[in-house]
Image (cartoon, helix red, strand yellow):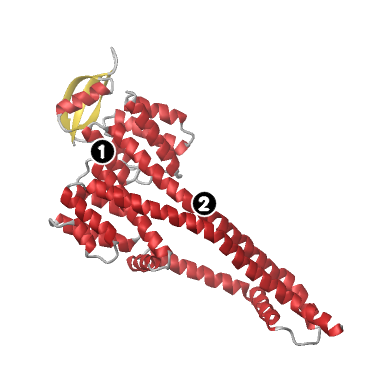
Amino acid sequence: MAIFKYRAKKGPADVVQGNIEAETSDEAVDKLSQMGYHPLSVSKGSLPDKEDKRAVVIRGKVKSGDVTVFTRQLASLLKSGVSILSALNIISDQSENQILTDILRRVHNAIKEGSTFSSVLGEYPKVFSSLYVAMVRTGESSGSLPESLYRIADHRAKQEEMFSRFRMALAYPVLMALVGLGTVIFMLTFVMPRLMGIFANMGQDLPVPTKILIYISGGLRDSWFWIVLILSLVFLILMRTLRTDAGRLSVSAFKLHLPVFGIFMLKAELARFCRTLELLLKNGVPILKAMNIAIPVLENDIIKNKLKEGSKDLEQGGSLGKSLKGASLFPVFMSNLIVVGEESGRLEEALSEVAASYERDTDEAIRIMSSLLEPVMILVMGLIVGFIVVAMLLPIFEINVMTR
């Protein structure tokens, strides 16, 4: 994109000037006309220093759902023939998220000064990902921005729905675990010490479960500071380790080798990669560039590294599917479909089939997990609380037996 300086009439007596990005001067004139200006002069120039050094600082966080709603609203307005400047004004006035409203107003002003929509969005990487910006850029280039925005919105909605189901599946078990843990700590630190005086006056040997419970209760009361300190140190060490490449690789490998959960995480990551790559290819992004955008979307570093090797093979004229086939990490189903898709020229369809298959598997795994976790948590917490109650009552039962 080149930079063109312009002078244009905004009204009968209102002349404005500024910079606009375009491939040619004719394209710059067309863009100015679409903005409602009447160009007086257009000449090639460069951005001022203040534009080159522009940095955007965002205080706060924009929810993913708010970005998805904005994207769908913008696509609908553009599809209806509303100009992008008017559409941004309408959405910013209606948005309930003040941070997003401020961003949209900045985007509006930057576009009005001549910047492209995609280049302005790129200044907010925490809100608009590289995938989002790439899709918008290709939509601008091909003249199909509304369609690109619809695809982005659909993709984001599917991802958010999957994460929502996963969170809902874990919500009840996590709540039960927290309540159960609080109950156990209360019984060990508050109830048990009051019973220990009674047990001490019995003058008899206590049952083994009761002795274990007394030992644990005493440890919690006497060593709680050291327990909290050790757990805090372990947490800090883990966080520091995760900031290193070796630490992230170790954690990624550990996740993939977990029983049951390992294959679930692998399929979820591969589904996300295939769906993202398919989306980019459908939007006209070259495959090498699409790979460079799709790979960072993933979270597991082991999978990322393997896919980067496949991208290098592709860059050197090789086959992505054959490269993945040589890596034992990827399922044969995925690599074979991609090979067939490459050979038949229908790679997008192959990626869509792989993504759909793994998304179904992931959904089924989430349903099974949500169905099993609740009874398992109830059983585990019941056993723990039951052991504590039995350990407390055993000495009393023994006294009753001895007094008969």
User: Which circle, 1 or 2, is nearer the viewer?
Assistant: 2
Marker disc for residue 137: 1
| Kind of element beneath mark 2 | helix
Residue 332, x across and y down, in percent: 27, 61
On the rendered structure, is 63 left or right of 85? right
Which of the pair 207/343 is nearer the observer? Answer: 343
Residue 35 quadrant = top left
Which of disc 2 and disc 1 is earlier in sequence? 1
Q: Quadrant of the C terminus?
A: bottom right
On the rendered structure, is 383 left or right of 279? right
Marker disc for residue 239: none
Q: Quadrant of the N terminus?
A: top left
- Kindly give the residue lying farthest to the top in the view shown: 12
Residue 29, x across and y down, in percent: 19, 24
Mark 2, other Cα within 10 Å: few <14 / some 14–19 / many ≥20: few
Marker disc for residue 168: 2
Residue 142, x across and y down, in percent: 21, 34
Amino acid type, label 1: Arg
Please report the residue visible at 30 percent of the width from the left and 28 percent of the height from the top: 112
Which of the pair 24/382 is nearer the observer? Answer: 382
Residue 49 in sight in this render: no
| Kind of element beneath mark 1 | helix
Please report the residue visible at 28 percent of the width from the left and 29 percent of the height from the top: 113
Residue 397, x across and y down, in percent: 79, 78
Q: Is residue 148 above or below residue 200?
A: above
- Kindly give the residue lying farthest to the left in the view shown: 317
Amino acid type, label 2: Met
